């Protein structure tokens, strides 16, 4: 029966802790979601991604036929002309024929003058052009697709960094609020000490200097409290700035985050494969490799087809005489361009070698970042544990010193020193908690474990 009770108690405690963690997670997660939805810089990067998607759509459209309607009507006078001596050629013949036939059936004609600029002439046609073979279009599309991957990695990288900043800003606000509470409690303590010392002086059991020292302690704590208030306001303003909301917006305080800090977890210290920094470099490398293939297409010809159908002639008649069709193939092959294309290929290959070297260097730097972050996280945990012990010890030391002081067995300087050490220990513990939370957020950042999809 006892075992059953203990098991039920364990389940209740575990369930309560889980509910507290879920509540803490939900509050912070809601802030993170709000920040991701409203951050202006992130929206700007989303616009860049949309632009890259539109560039890809344009690259795909180059594979489709190009259809256009072209209509031209010209009116002209003057300009170049060509003399056509048709009269000089035919009039002697016509004269001989008239003599032979004793008639005038063959009249004399004038020489003609042909104007090069057409007058009252129309050319209305529907033009269709289609690329038959053009490898550069395929590589251009692949480049645009890879650029989108790069932009997506950039957006994810900014999101991950924003999540990290929001978490750190929220933890800083929690610590600033906790420090404010510490100094508020310290002020109540020194005010109580002042009241007690004033009572001692009133009863002629102590001199006036104890009151003056107590007032000095009150002033010191009030100064620290004012500074803590300012720090809390600044922390709240920065947190609201990240969420793109008014700086005075109230922030929900979640004390369970400080009360239930996670203990050291078993973490495999290795570079994650999904770090956006590496993805961006890899995407840039693929873009350069595709660009290399694009530059090498100068060796290949391009072939396109065209088809025109329309009406052409003098005046707008649109009859069978003006109707025409024209179709054909067009081959374009650049044979020589002063070795410019070969130089482009060499430049691109050099860029590929450089970015491969950059990838290796970045990979080593990130691996070092993961290792050092994990080490500092473990050190922060140990520091927090030691400062937690110091808080308990100093709190008990102050309680005992205060008790002895009220019994006249301790000096005022001992009481002041015990109070200062207690407040200092509480502040140091609060800072140690902040350090653990910050290092945990940083470890989450460098390990890329937060799901930002």
Image (cartoon, rainbow, N blue to C red):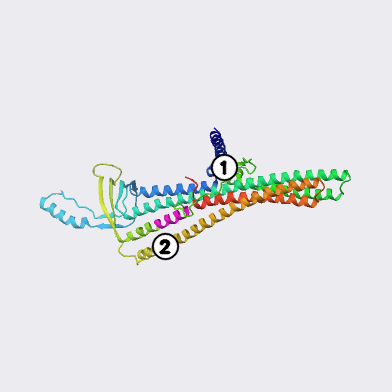
| Mark closer to the observer (1, 2) | 1
Is residue 286 highlighted in magenta? yes
| Mark 1 or mark 2, earlier in chain | 1
Residue 199 vs residue 217, the one in the foreground: 199
Residue visible at 42% across and 52% down? 147
In terms of depth relative to the viewer, which is nearer, 171 or 62?
A: 171
Please count the marks in the image.
2
Query: Where does the N terminus fall, quadrant-wise?
Result: top right
Which label was assigned to residue 28?
Answer: 1
Image x and y of residue 336, in percent: 31, 65
The residue stretch that appears in magenta: 275-287
Asked if the magenta segment contains residue 290, the reply would be no
| Residue 270 at x, y percent in the picture | 47, 55
Residue at 57 percent across and 49 percent down: it is 165
Coordinates of residue 200 in the picture (x, y in percent)? 85, 45
Among the 4 quarters of the image, the one containing residue 12: top right
Disc 1 to disc 2, how far (Cα)? Answer: 43 Å
SS at badge 1: helix
* Residue count near mark 1 (Cα–Cα under 10 Å), binned few <14, some 14–19, many ≥20: many
Q: Please name the residue that numbered disc 2 is placed on.
A: 351
Residue occupying the point 78% across, 52% down: 414
Report the side of 315 relative to 281 (left or right).
Answer: left
SS for tag 2? helix
Principal secondary structure, stretch drawn in magenta: helix
């Amino acid at each position: 029966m006892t075992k059953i009770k203990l098991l039920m108690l364990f389940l209740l405690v575990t369930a309560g802790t889980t509910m507290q963690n879920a509540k803490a997670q939900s509050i912070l997660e809601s802030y993170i979601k709000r920040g991701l939805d409203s951050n202006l810089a992130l929206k700007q990067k989303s616009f860049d991604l949309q632009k890259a998607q539109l560039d890809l759509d344009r690259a795909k459209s180059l594979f489709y036929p190009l259809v256009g309607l072209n209509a031209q009507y010209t009116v002209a006078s003057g300009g170049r002309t060509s003399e056509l001596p048709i009269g000089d050629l035919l009039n002697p013949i016509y004269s001989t024929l008239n003599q032979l036939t004793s008639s005038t059936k063959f009249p004399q004609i004038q020489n003609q003058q042909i104007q090069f600029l057409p007058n009252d002439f129309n050319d209305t046609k529907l033009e269709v052009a289609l690329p038959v073979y053009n490898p550069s279009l395929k590589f251009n599309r692949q480049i645009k697709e890879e650029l989108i991957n790069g932009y997506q990695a950039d957006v994810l990288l900014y999101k991950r960094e924003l999540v990290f900043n929001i978490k750190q800003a929220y933890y800083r606000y929690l610590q600033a609020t906790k420090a404010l509470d510490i100094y508020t409690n310290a002020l109540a303590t020194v005010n109580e000490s002042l009241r007690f010392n004033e009572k001692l002086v009133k009863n002629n059991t102590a001199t006036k200097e104890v009151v003056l020292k107590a007032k000095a302690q009150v002033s010191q704590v009030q100064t620290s409290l004012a500074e803590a208030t300012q720090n809390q306001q600044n922390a709240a303003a920065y947190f609201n700035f990240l969420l793109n909301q008014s700086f005075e917006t109230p922030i929900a305080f979640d004390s369970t985050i400080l009360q239930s800090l996670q203990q050291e977890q078993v973490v495999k210290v290795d570079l994650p494969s999904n770090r956006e920094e590496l993805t961006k470099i890899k995407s840039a490398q693929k873009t350069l490799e595709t660009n290399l293939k694009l530059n090498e297409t100068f060796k290949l010809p391009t072939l396109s087809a065209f088809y025109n159908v329309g009406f052409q002639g003098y005046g707008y008649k649109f009859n069978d005489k003006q109707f025409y069709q024209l179709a054909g193939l067009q081959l374009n092959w650049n044979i020589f361009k002063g070795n410019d294309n070969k130089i482009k290929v060499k430049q691109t290959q050099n860029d590929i070698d450089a970015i491969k070297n950059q990838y290796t260097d970045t990979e080593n730097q990130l691996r070092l970042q993961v290792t050092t972050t994990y080490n500092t996280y473990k050190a922060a945990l140990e520091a927090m544990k030691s400062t937690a012990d110091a808080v308990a010890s100093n709190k008990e030391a102050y309680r005992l010193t205060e008790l002895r002081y009220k019994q006249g067995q301790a000096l005022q300087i001992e009481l002041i020193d015990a109070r200062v050490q207690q407040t200092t220990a509480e502040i140091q513990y609060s800072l140690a908690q902040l350090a653990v939370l910050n290092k945990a957020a940083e470890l989450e950042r460098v390990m890329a474990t937060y799901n930002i999809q």
